[in-house]
Image (cartoon, rainbow, N blue to C red):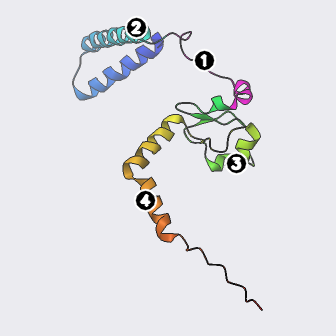
Amino acid sequence: MSTKSLIELSARIIAAQALRKTMTPADIDSELRAVFQTLRELDHVEQQTQPSQSKAAPTHTLDYLRQHPHASVQPHQVICLECGKAYSLLPHRHLVAHDLTPTTYKQKWGLPRATPLSAHSLTHRRRRLAKTLGTGQQLIAWQAQHRQPMLKPVASPES
């Protein structure tokens, strides 16, 4: 965080304190310095604990994703290969804006039909919830109850 941002944040904190209690100009000055120093130290510690940009996973460009469409479905987002916007779930409404359906989108970009257009984390969370609620077993039971009995073929009259 820049020094200017830290100063502005410190000033907001002290201004909020000054609204709650009476402070002399000297109190404001000393508190402002103390808060600024604390924020600067916290920022320094945060920068040291964060991985460097070179160690982080590379951010793929839209051109790369279009050449490797499977990479557009990521752990926490799905990148639209048409416009590059990120979503946790690529909505049907967004695809309609590109004159596509989920099926035609997958065909156009060479994705298997079974590929979910949602982030891996969302897919896994929904799968766990469905297992917990027993949705699959409920569906099987419903299908068994509503399955139409097969019609027996009518015997043709023999002459």
In the rendered structure, does residue 56 fall within the stretch colored magenta? yes
What residue is shown at x 42% (from left), y 7% (from top)?
A: 48
Q: Give me the C-alpha separation between circle 2 and circle 1.
A: 24 Å
**Closer to the observer: label 3 or label 1?**
3
Report the residue marked by disc 3.
Answer: 103
Task: Specify the principal SS of the magenta part.
Answer: loop
Q: Give me the C-alpha separation between circle 2 and circle 4.
A: 54 Å
Sequence-wise first label, 3 or 1: 1
Name the element at disc 4. helix
Q: Give me the C-alpha separation between circle 3 and circle 4.
A: 27 Å
Image marks 3 and 1: residues in contact by CB distance under 8 Å: no
Report the residue marked by disc 2.
Answer: 44
What residue is shown at x 32% (from left), y 11% (from top)?
A: 38
Image marks 3 and 4: residues in contact by CB distance under 8 Å: no
Region rendered in magenta: 52-69
Report the residue marked by disc 4.
Answer: 138
Q: Where does the image place residue 119, in percent across and percent down from the top left? A: 54, 36
Report the residue marked by disc 1.
Answer: 58
Name the element at disc 2. helix
Sequence-wise first label, 2 or 1: 2
The answer to whether 58 is drawn above or below residue 79 in the figure is above
Residue 158 relative to residue 94: left or right: right
Q: Where does the image place residue 17, in percent across and percent down from the top left? A: 27, 24
**Closer to the observer: label 2 or label 4?**
4
Q: Give me the C-alpha separation between circle 2 and circle 3.
A: 49 Å
Type of amino acid at the residue the image marks with label 4: Gln
The quadrant of the image that shows the C terminus is bottom right
Type of amino acid at the residue the image marks with label 1: Pro
Sequence-wise first label, 4 or 1: 1
